[in-house]
Every structure is written in C-alpha cells, then in structure tokens.
Image (cartoon, rainbow, N blue to C red):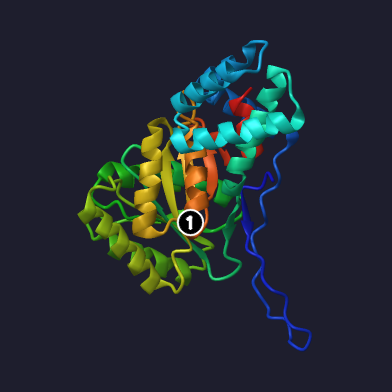
Amino acid sequence: MFSFFRKKSVPAPAADEAPIATPAEPAEPEPKSTAARAGWLAKLSLGLKKTGSGITQVFTGTRIDEALYEELEAALLMADAGVGATEFLLADLKRRVKQAKATEPAIVKGLLADSIADLLAPLQRPLELQAAGGTVMMVVGVNGAGKTTTIGKLTRHLAEGGHKVLLAAADTFRAAAREQLAVWAGRAQVEIVSQEGGDPAAVTFDAVTAGRARGCDVVIADTAGRLPTQLHLMDELKKIKRTIGKAQDSAPHEVLLVVDGNTGQNALSQVKSFDEALALTGLVVTKLDGTAKGGVLAAIALWGRERAGGPVPVYFIGVGEALEDLETFDAREFAQALLG
C-alpha cells in the first residue's frame, strides 16, 4: 500500500523451459512507516479542510430529514463534485441510510465516507514499471498545473528507490522549464537530454534511444504546457507520442496528465480532452492544499465508469511543494480526510 512504485509481474517460465537470465532489478522502495503515513494523512486532511468543511457542517444537527439532504447536495456542488456525481452520491447515501436504519447524523456522515470511498476506489491503482526493457513516461498538462515539479518529485522517488532515470526536456521553447528540470535532475543525480529551441519530438526520440542504450529503468519526457483547445499544439503532443513509439516499441508505457486540483470542474474537462487526444493512462492531481474544489475527484470517478477503457487511475495526489507532499492515492484515506 505504501510503496511508491511496483514492478509489473513477469510470467514464470513453463516447466520445460530454462529460466531466462535477467539483470538484477533495483530494490523496491521500503514501505512507509506508520508514523510517516500518519503525517501524510494529517497534511491531506489539512489540505482538504476547505473542501470538507462545508460538507461536514451538514451533519452538525440532530435530524436526518430532507433538509439535511438538500444541504448536503449544495455542499457537494460547492465542492465541485459536479451534478452527476452529487446525484449519484445522494442516491447511494439514502440507500445506505435505509439499509443501516441510521438515525444519527454522525452515522450518516460515516456512511457518506463509505459511499465516496467506494466511488473513488476504481481510481486507486499503483503505477507499475516495466519488468524489463525500461519504462517510458510522457507527462502532459496545462501551464501552471505543476507538471515539471511533479516530474522532479517522481524522479527523486525513483532514484532513491535505486532506479536509473533519464529525463527528456521536451519543452524546448521555454528556457525556464528546461532550467527547472535540470535543477531536479541535479538534485536526484540523474541525466537529462535537453536542446534549446529544438524540435520536441526529436529531443524525446533522442532521450528514449539514449535511455535504451544506457540501460535506464525509466525515461520521463516533460512536454510544453498547453490548453486542450489549442488544437495545433495538441497535435504536437500526438506527434511526440508517435515518435516515442518509433524509438521504442509499445512506448510510451504511461501517458500521465498532471491536473491542478484548484481548477474544479475544469479539471474534468482537461482529463476528457487530453484523454481523447492521447489515451491517458494515469493522473496526478496537485495543489489540493487550500482548495475548496477537491470534490472533482468524484466527478472524474463517475466519468471513468462510462469511459470505454475503464477509469483513468489517479496514481498520485499532492498537497504541497515538498518532496514528501506527493503521495500515492488511496480512496479510503481521501474520503476520510475529506470528511474529517
């Protein structure tokens, strides 16, 4: 539960086959201690305080009636859960209340936590690295979502876990992005492929090729931030993805969208647009600290139920700028932190 990454399992050889020798794999990160996880949960609860306070206030009364459900509906909408997810949670909560024959608002609050946790559960999935051949990640998002910082944090966690990482500075037209990524590369003591003013797809191709030649476990490509409405720039992202596939078969293995949790329902629009263009494999939700819009995860989860390929998992969530402020997403923890 506490491991940041895990390796994809490799099928065992058949009984009549000789085992194939493979190089030693980097050690898996040690599970976090209970105290460390408790510290993270405290930060998450504080980060979600603005989102959850409006919801928890609904349960300060003594009666369970239609007025309570109306107040809860308004609170969920204010938290940016969206109309669909709000209606879903209310209907599910009423069913649970009836089934449990609950008569106390405090009990109803606990049942709401169960409902939210169950809705979010399909989003909970660990990021798996390829067992052999190296994992290529392509990271996308709008300007200001925290994309480069997130890449830096992931790189640090990977490097500290013994994985050999190579970064690709494919945001070639913004010097600040290259410099910021270079700083993170220096902190984690990993290599970076960078080129001023070059073609982003070419830089990514060179990085993936170099990663294979140098035996890297992970190659992470940073890309220029853009709005999904900028169709010509979205086409450039598609070109980068195609180019990665030419450099390494079946790559990129992960297409990660970094989403700013402060943007509320706009975050869902971003997920839908980037997914349509690039077929997302995972999300990182940042800046949940101080926002009153953390309920958007419920909207993303409900949309995921209707998505042809199933829900897009939320691999990580962030509540601050420090390295330890980015952690694996756990549906039950999130629901409990949201409702105090």
Which residue is at a point 41% across and 33% down the rendered structure image? 264
Task: Determine whether, in the image, residue 294 is placed left or right of residue 203.
Answer: right
Location of residue 112 by image quarter = top right
Location of residue 121 by image quarter = top right
* Residue 229 spot, x, y in % from top left: 25, 47
* Residue 21 spot, x, y in % from top left: 68, 78
- Position of residue 320 relative to residue 159, above or below, is above
Which residue is at a point 72% across and 23% down the rendered structure image? 107
Disc 1 residue type? Thr
Crowd around label 1: few <14 · some 14–19 · many ≥20 (10 Å): many
- Position of residue 271 relative to residue 55, above or below, is below
Which residue is at a point 66% across and 24% down the rendered structure image? 109
* Residue 212 spot, x, y in % from top left: 47, 70
Disc tally is 1
Q: Secondary structure at mark 1?
A: loop
- Identify the residue under disc 1: 281
Seen from the viewer's position, the closer of residues 166 and 318 is 318
The quadrant the C terminus occupies is: top right
Residue closest to the far top: 61
Residue closest to the far bottom: 16
Q: In this view of the protein, can residue 49 be seen by the observer?
A: no
* Residue 256 spot, x, y in % from top left: 44, 52
Q: In this view of the protein, can residue 79 be seen by the observer?
A: yes
Residue closest to the far right: 15
Seen from the viewer's position, the closer of residues 280 and 215 is 280
Which residue is at a point 31% across and 40% down the rendered structure image? 143
Task: Determine whether, in the image, residue 333 is placed left or right of residue 173.
Answer: right
